[in-house]
Amino acid sequence: MNLLDTIIKAAPEAHIVTETDGIQIVAVTPEELPAAAQALAQRPEGAMDFLYDLTGMDWGEEGLGVLYQLESTATGERIILRTQTTDRERPLLPSVSTLWPTAEIKEREAFDFLGIRFTGNPDMRRLYLREDWKGYPLRKDYDATANELTLDNEINADTTEEYTLRPDGTLECHEHQLFGNDDFVVNIGPQHPSTHGVLRLRTALDGEVIRHVDPILGYIHRGIEKMAERMTYPQTLAMTDRLDYLSAHQNRHALCRCIEGAMELEVPERAEYIRTIMDELQRIDSHLLFYSCLAMDMGALTPFFYGFREREMILNIFEETTGGRLIQNYNVIGGVRADLHPDFCNKTKEFIVHLRQVLPDYHNIFTGSIIAKTRLEGVGRLSREQVIGLGATGGTGRASGWANDVRKRHPYAVYDQVDFEEVVRTEGDSMARYLVRMDEIEQSCRIIEQLIDRIPEGPVRTKTKPIIKLPEGIFTASVEASRGAFGVLLESRGDKSPYRLHFRSTGLPLVHTMDTACRGAKLADLIAIGGSIDFVIPDIDR
Amino acid sequence: MKTDEFKNNDYLQRLVDKLNADGAGIVLTTLDEAINWGRSNSLWSLTFGTSCCAIEFMALGAARYDMARFGFEVTRNSPRQADMIMVLGTITWKMASVLRRLYDQMADPKYVVAVGGCTISGGPFRGSYHVVEGIDKIIPVDVYIPGCPPRPEAFFYGMMQLQRKVKAERFLGGRNHKESRPKEETQTDETAE
Ligand code: SF4
């Protein structure tokens, strides 16, 4: 049975709205959503077990709604479900968090931004904004003056709310206690050097053993998605570099691809090669930083200097061509901003030779050491089902046996022309997550080597008008960023700025796994587990 | 940068003039100089990296830029042990109260370095509903380092400016940062009066 039939069998009123990039968008009513979702999640011919993303939308008169991007890990099929409610005063939608655990946190995001309450989600607190925030910023009628900058300390609730719908249509609210009476709660962050940014984790302990981790986000929520609605398309690009700055290039690549796809713009082949090489250099850059920081979090200082020594070489290469070290602003709609520096190819090749020579040192000093082994092996285990359910892509997913690499599953740029391995491990512990990333450095080198001598001649950019208008519709694109699948969802109403621009954060599902990964581990392991899961906070908070 | 430009610091000169005009005792001044020499070469900073700029700060700590050459490689994770707070990255509304609290917890004399466009004016995120448009709305700032992110060299220049400011100050009997909140019109240059 194909996907549409599966849905229609469970939800007779469902129908196709449009199609984007070969993915069908199917509308279902809120009443039929649970049945349709269940039928898809348990489809015998290939369960749609991966909720790639859940995006809250404000369609003005038509009401508030949600788009569910679903994917099957077995067959790679994709579909988008769309549901909406016209009630703007009391928008209610059924939760899908029992089918896809990752929805638990993403529904909180939709609630925070748009005020949609999900019945049956056990945790309906705000996710990013302060608990005393008024209004929902991503609604089109949001009053920007409703809130003021305050220096009062925020008090966080110790309870969560769950809403259920009574048969007569009234709402019932249950409170859940976050922490037990005999839990000892340690507050880690938001200003803590080992949380890799401004993450806050409220950690409930039993002695030294972690019972529960409650992440509090939003300390670096910059409101990018709302800002983008006032920007022209070329302007929105600048935001992407600053999300996950260690995937700056890949993030921008995703948005460029999305816009190029929407306007059906052909990108010169030379630009595609350059983008691919830059993406891979960025990945090496990010993984080197990962190595440095993980080691430093665990108290080893020398690896930090090793990692940064090689990383500086990549930054030099970046800087020569793009002018930027960390934030490069290099991809533009239609290609890349400037041609490669004449030394680029030579330097890159030299760098790869050098990196191969020093990588054994990295392993000698850290990987093999008894301290690293005891602190990483067998700690923070995640099973394959858990990572899929939680949507933890990238190295974290691959360390638990889930082959989720976007470069392999839905190739883009010139990834279909290169030969590389997708590094997958099955242990699912911190050590596996660490080793996956170290091995990926080697694979990235391989990709670059295959491409660097084959870069075709020609222009690096298709000229576009300064003001770009996209046709109406919903467009998506995703890339494999340094730490997982990064996606863009764009709704256009034919204007020069997007009607809604949503980024699938790679880090949000990762930080969501912390609770699962840390339960039962020791408090000291929390830092190492967090380091190995490898998230970047501005990308989570957006 | 040319040496002349590097030395061209009107506000430092004004500070020195003012100190001289008040008339300082010879013993105290000499002692002050010695103390300030020591203070300026061992500025301990509170790590407060919220986003991208913090990664460039890490690069500063590594071998290529090696900030230990100037005496500010010691970072502290507790505000009570820090001389200065280096604000690296966007400050959001949710973070504002935390930043203010950390600043209040630091012992005097304390300094604030605002790194990157975000901390100066909100940078690329100016106009967002959740971004503080310049940390000088929350705490007084001593040195601004522009850039997005600033180059490591710019960090050093900014830090040297701070060192010079420290050197030009009166430590003994002087007042350090008595103001609790920045006044509307006050130039931050003068907060160290
Ligand atoms: S100034 Fe630029 S680099 Fe620095 S935190 Fe802001 S956006 Fe990031």
Image (spheres, rainbow, N blue to C red):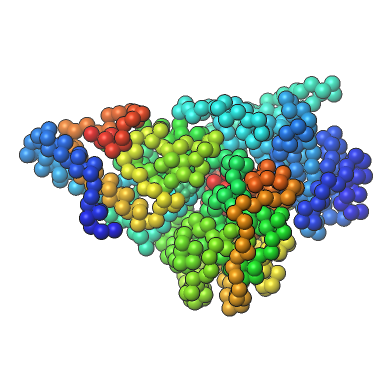
Percent x, y for residue B191? 28, 34
Question: Which quadrant is home to the C terminus of chain A?
Answer: top right
Q: Is residue A9 visible?
A: yes
Percent x, y for residue A504? 65, 48
Is B132 located above or below residue A166 in the figure? below
Residue at 50% from the left image edge and 45% from the top image edge:
B124
Q: Is residue A198 visible?
A: no
Percent x, y for residue B162? 28, 46
Percent x, y for residue A203? 55, 38
Q: Residue furthest left?
A: B26
Q: Residue B115 vs residue A239: left or right?
A: left
Question: Which quadrant is home to the N terminus of chain A?
Answer: bottom right
Q: Residue A140 vs residue A359: left or right?
A: right
Residue at 50% from the left image edge and 56% from the top image edge:
A327
Residue at 6% from the left image edge and 39% from the top image edge:
B26
Most foreground residue, A122 or A426: A122
Number of marks present in the image shown: 0
Residue A87's quadrant in the figure? top right
Q: Residue A139 vs residue A531: left or right?
A: right
Is B88 located above or below residue A275 in the figure? above
Residue at 55% from the left image edge and 27% from the top image edge:
A145
Most foreground residue, A316 or A38: A316
